[in-house]
Image (cartoon, rainbow, N blue to C red):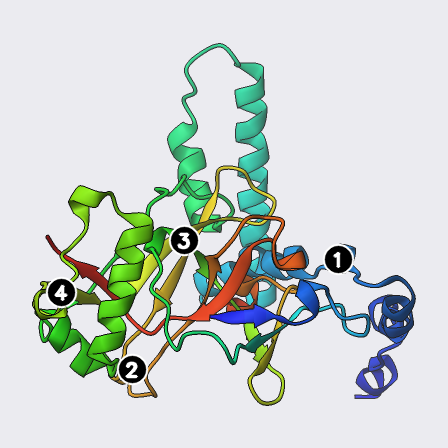
Amino acid sequence: MDMIYTESHFNFVKMHLLSHFSDHIRQFGNIPMYSTEFGELRHMEQIKDGWRRSNKNDVERQILHSYGRQHAIRIRLLNLISLRPRRANPCDHVLRYLDKTTGTVSTPAPRGRILKDRRDDVSDVLDFCTLVGISLDWICLELIRYSRHNLRTERRPPEEPAILQLLPVELLTPTEIPVLAFQETDVYDIHRARCTGTHRFRNQESRKDWVWVQAGSEEMYGALRGRLPAKLVALFKIRD
Amino acid sequence: MLSPVNSGRPSDIHSLVTVQLREDAREFTLVDIGTILSLAHLIPEGDRRWLVNSRIGLRTFNEIY
């Protein structure tokens, strides 16, 4: 116990630096080089995965062994690959397996957005407005504005509200958005943006996520580079 | 859709961009799903204002917190 009391302190570099950050930011602005993202992400691979694989006895030793083994195998495989650059790579499947289990690399994701979980209680625009709580006049005006700006003439729906309100609609809950991972060029994270409308989400309140929308060119909106945040109210498709 | 405060320039104090609800904006805006880039992380700052989190990645934030 004595050792615990004597060794329990916050007198290390990381904590000391915190006292300088506020002055530094006031003088020089943002400190992006101090991102904790990379270091914190390592906790998953180096510690949490090892803990899950352990039998929870003498956990520290098992975590160290688990990561040590994985690291050693990976180095060995990379050495083998570099020694045999012109032949077919026999270790690809093993590397892929290691990537999957360590979560360091993922295969490139499709560029498109995937909409999921179609709801059966909506069949047309009128149903949609009632369920989501949006006025029919507004949705008709927005549909007309949207189609004039984005659709070719032959694909535009008719502009009479009486016809627009009967257009078939599919209401969906989540969408999967592939987003380039931090400092990567071909590795994607999947962001699942959800919008449950008036329905509760997992026995909690209804969920309407914030998303980034490309609303203008990169020169617009300063540091936001043409992107604006918006709250998802509904995700829907209008069928022909 | 929110709009940036101070033309999207980061604050001198906390170096984050602030966004707010626009009075003149339409209540809802219809956008193409292809223009949705990713999830956003906003921190409420008073009434109708939010700070844009540019300090920590959303994935890291969700995994840690």
Q: Residue A176 vs residue A16: left or right? A: left
- The alpha-carbon separation of the residues under discs 1 and 2 comes to 36 Å
State the image quarter where residue A87 is shown. Answer: top left
Between disc 1 and disc 2, the foreground one is 1
Q: Which of the two marks, 2 or 3, is nearer to us in this view? A: 3
Mark 1 and mark 2 residues within 8 Å of each other at the beta carbon? no
User: Are the residues tagged 1 and 4 within 8 Å (C-beta)?
Assistant: no
Q: Nearer the viewer, mark 1 or mark 4?
A: 4
Q: Which mark is residue B35?
A: 3
For the residues beneath circles 1 and 3, the answer to whether they share a chain is: no
Q: Give how far across and how far down residue A216 sits, in percent.
A: 52, 53
Residue at which label 2 appears:
A202
Q: What residue lies at 48% left-to-right and 57% top-to-bottom?
A: A215
Disc 4 to disc 2, C-alpha distance: 39 Å
Mark 1 residue element: helix
Tag 4, which chain? Answer: A
Cα gap from disc 2 to disc 3, whole angstroms: 28 Å
Amino acid at dot 1: Pro
Label 3 residue SS: helix
Label annotation for residue A160: 4
Q: Which mark is residue A32?
A: 1
The residue at the point 19 percent across, 68 percent down is A171
Q: How many marks?
A: 4
Q: CA distance from mark 4 to mark 3?
A: 27 Å
Task: Work out whether residue B17 can be spotted.
Answer: yes
Q: Are marks 4 and 3 in contact (CB under 8 Å)?
A: no
Q: Nearer the viewer, residue A79 or A227?
A: A227
SS type, badge 2: loop
What distance separates the C-alpha of mark 1 from that of mark 3? Answer: 27 Å
Residue shown at 9%/71% (left/top)? A120
* Residue at mark 1 shares a chain with residue at mark 4: yes
